[in-house]
Image (spheres, rainbow, N blue to C red):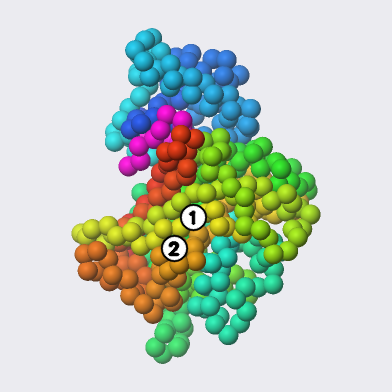
Amino acid sequence: MAHWSTTTLPYGVVRRAGQPPRPATTVGDDAVDLAGLARDGLLDGALADPLGTLDHPTLDRFLAAGPDVWRGLRDRLLELVHDGSADGPTAARLAAHRVPLAEVSPVLAWSVADYVDFYSSREHATNVSRIFRPDEPSLPDAWDHLPIGYHGRAGTVVVSGTPIVRPTGLRRDPVRSDIVSGPSRHLDVEVELGWVVGVGSQLGSTVPTTAFADHVLGAVVVNDWSARDLQAFEYRPLGPFLGKSFATSVSPWIVPLDALATARVAPPPPPHPPAHHLAPAGDGYAIGFELELTAAGGAPTVLARSDAAGLRWTPAQQLAHMTSNGASLRTGDLYASGTISGASSDQRGSLLELTWGWSDALTLVDGVTRRDGLADGDVVTIRASAPGPDGGPVTLGEVTGRIEPARR
């Protein structure tokens, strides 16, 4: 479980036994009840309507309220935490709304309106092309001219800790080469960075890259689970469908953009001048990821570490491209980076790459091996952190999921 600094102040929703879900932030090892702060008058002046915005079982109203409200709440929380760090009336009032994280359960913090997944890591895209299409060009012509993506299923986005049921579908039998139906044999993970949209846009209008912070509240850690054998059979000519749509896991806490300010970096230089709607590029984010796998009854093994700083397309460009044809944003939209991989073999963000197309076995610390993908009972955890203003890390928390057998 992450220990949260007093300056990160992410937003989530938690449930305590016998109580309804409540919006919260985190300080140290505690959740802080935001609706409780509003009822206690501690947020008066920071928001025009604290109770109306925060006394709700999701963050939907807060997301829709926009950047002035987001900034006002964050500024007020920073004041409260600072004033509450010493003995005094503020500390006592703040303590009344703190509860240990170990005593609450996270729930999906917002209503996911739409889900788009991009393909922004050159290393990942090149690796996948070499594995699946070794006799073809490593990247499609469009890849360096626009952020390639696909639409997923918003209804299958789940919060960290939700069990993942092995999907079934059609695939090609690797021995007989005929088409069979059954549970996926190549169940995989994808290490990704996600962004949560708060303010929507009008159908027919476009959102420029410079308006990124006007629409996006913050970031989450994403695992876009993938059934590679189902995906390989179905993905031409229209791309991923059932091989991707069965589950996408997100971390419980949305880390606001302001908490990630010191993680902003210039993106890699583009090989071509960007299209008009993709300029200026906006910031990349130096957010590091760690992929961990634990077999049932075993010890955890860190399989890879990668960093979002090398992504070809920035979140501002991804957002702009989603609306460049006039498609509208909605409050609660989620979009993700695509698998984040690096240049070396220990920086690959998927098992497909780590085993190089299921040809190399992965050996875990307890001697268990994995060649064909995830086994039932495996637990996958992805953690992320970024450089903070004081030199320490800003955690984004973690997303985890346990594989359950396919259901007939």
Q: Residue at the location (48% across, 15% down)?
A: 42
Q: Residue at the location (41% across, 90% down)?
A: 176
Disc 2 is placed on an element classified as helix
Quarter containing the N terminus: top left
Whether residue 400 appears in this view of the structure is yes
Q: Position of residue 102 (x, y in %)?
A: 29, 36
Quarter containing the C terminus: bottom left
- What is the CA distance from the residue labelled 1 to the residue labelled 2? 8 Å
* Residue 359 position (above or below residue 284): below
Residue that badge 2 annotates: 347
Q: Nearer the viewer, residue 394 or 134?
A: 394
Question: Circle 2: is it few (<14), some (14-19), or many (20+) Cα within 10 Å?
Answer: many
Q: Per the image, is 345 magenta?
A: no
Q: Position of residue 164 (x, y in %)?
A: 37, 58
- Which residues are drawn in magenta? 1-16
The image quadrant that residue 373 belongs to is bottom left
Specify the amino acid type for callout 1: Asp
Q: Position of residue 181 (x, y in %)?
A: 43, 77
Checking the image for residue 307, the label placed there is: 1
Specify the amino acid type for callout 2: Gln
Identify the residue at the far top of this view: 89
Is 239 left, or right, of 401 in this rendering?
Answer: right
Whether residue 182 appears in this view of the structure is no
Question: Circle 1: is it few (<14), some (14-19), or many (20+) Cα within 10 Å?
Answer: many
Q: Residue at the location (74% across, 58% down)?
A: 274
What type of secondary structure mainly makes up the magenta span? Answer: loop
Identify the residue at the far bottom of this view: 176
Is 100 left, or right, of 235 in this rendering?
Answer: left
Sequence order check: which comes first, mark 1 or mark 2? Answer: 1
Q: Do residues under tags 1 and 2 come within 8 Å of each other at their CB atoms?
A: yes
Checking the image for residue 226, the label placed there is: none
